[in-house]
Amino acid sequence: MGPDAPTLCEGWKTRDLAVHLVMRDRDLPAMAGEHLKLFAKRHERVDQVLRDTPWPELIGKIASGPTVWNPSSWGIGVDSLMNTAEFLIHHEDVRRAQPGWRPRQLGTEVQKDMLPMVRSLALAYALRRGIHLVLQPRGFDEIRAGRTNRPTVTVSGLPVELLLYLFGRESRADVEVKETDPLTTDDDAHVEGATTAEIAIVEEDLGQDAEGKQWPSFLSGPGAGRKGPRRGPVVTPPEG
C-alpha cells in the first residue's frame, strides 16, 4: 500500500499516519510541539523532514521501532502499555478504509490484552455520550458504565472491536448495538463503573474538552487543535 491510501483518520492519508508514528517513536519533543509552543518549530522541522523521506524508508523507520531514549524501548511492559493499542488501532485505520476490508482473525491473547483498555475507556465514553453503556466482550465478563437513568446502549463483540468502537471507529467496528430504555427514572441514579472520585476526575476532564474535539482527548493526537486541513487522527464515519 502506498503513501496516498485513505485512512479512517480525518484528513490523513497513509503518509500522514506514518509520519505521526515515526515522530512518536523517534522524537517525543517534536510530538510535544503540536501542543507546546516551546517545541513548535522543532515539530514543524521534523514533520517536514519526515514528509520528504522516501516512502520505503519511512516505513522502515516504523518497522525498526523506537529509539533507545523512547520509554517504549525500555522493556516489554512499557512497550505493551504504550504501543499495543496504538498500533492496532492505526493498523485498522488503514485496513478498514479500503474497499472490501474484512475483520482479521486475532488470537485470544490479543483479545484479552485489549480488555484493560476497553474497561478504562467505558466510563468516559458513557458520560460523554450521556448513556448507560453495557459492553459485552465475547468470551469475557460484561462491563457496565454510566448513569442508569440514561438510555442503555448495549454493545456486543470481540474486545478488539469494542476498543475500535470506543475510540470513535463505530461505523467500522464489527459489533452489535442495541438501545433500550433507562433502567430507572430516578434523578439521583448512581453511576456504574467507577468510584465517586474517579467519576469526578472523568467529568472534569470532559468539562475541559470545550472545543468539540473527538473524545478521548489523549487520542486526539497531533493536529487536534491545529488550524488547517491536517487534523487526524480524529475520526469521521466513512461513507458506505
Image (spheres, rainbow, N blue to C red):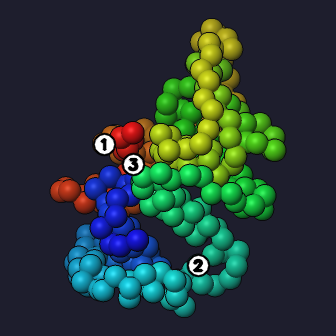
Q: Which residue is mark 2?
A: 72
Under mark 2, the amino acid is Ser
Q: Residues within 10 Å of mark 3 (few under 14, many from 20)?
A: many
The structure residue drawn at horizontal position 26% and vertical position 79%, both measured from the top left corner, is 51
> Left or right: 5 with respect to 164?
left
Mark 1 / mark 3, whichever is N-terminal:
1
The residues bearing labels 2 and 1 have C-alpha atoms spaced at a distance of: 30 Å
Q: In the structure shown, which secondary structural element does the residue marked by tag 1 occupy?
A: loop
- Proximity of marks 2 and 1: CB atoms separated by less than 8 Å: no
Specify the quadrant of the image occupied by residue 44.
bottom left
Tell me: residue 197, above or below residue 90: above
> Left or right: 196 with respect to 19?
right
Specify the quadrant of the image occupied by residue 179.
top right
The residues bearing labels 1 and 3 have C-alpha atoms spaced at a distance of: 15 Å
Residue 160 image offset from top left, x and y in percent: 64, 52
Residue 56 image offset from top left, x and y in percent: 38, 85
Specify the quadrant of the image occupied by residue 131.
top right
Q: Which residue is mark 1?
A: 211
Q: In the structure shown, which secondary structural element does the residue marked by tag 2 occupy?
A: helix
The residues bearing labels 3 and 2 have C-alpha atoms spaced at a distance of: 25 Å
> Left or right: 197 with respect to 212?
right
Mark 2 / mark 1, whichever is N-terminal:
2
- Number of the front mark, 2 or 1: 2
Q: Which residue is mark 3?
A: 235
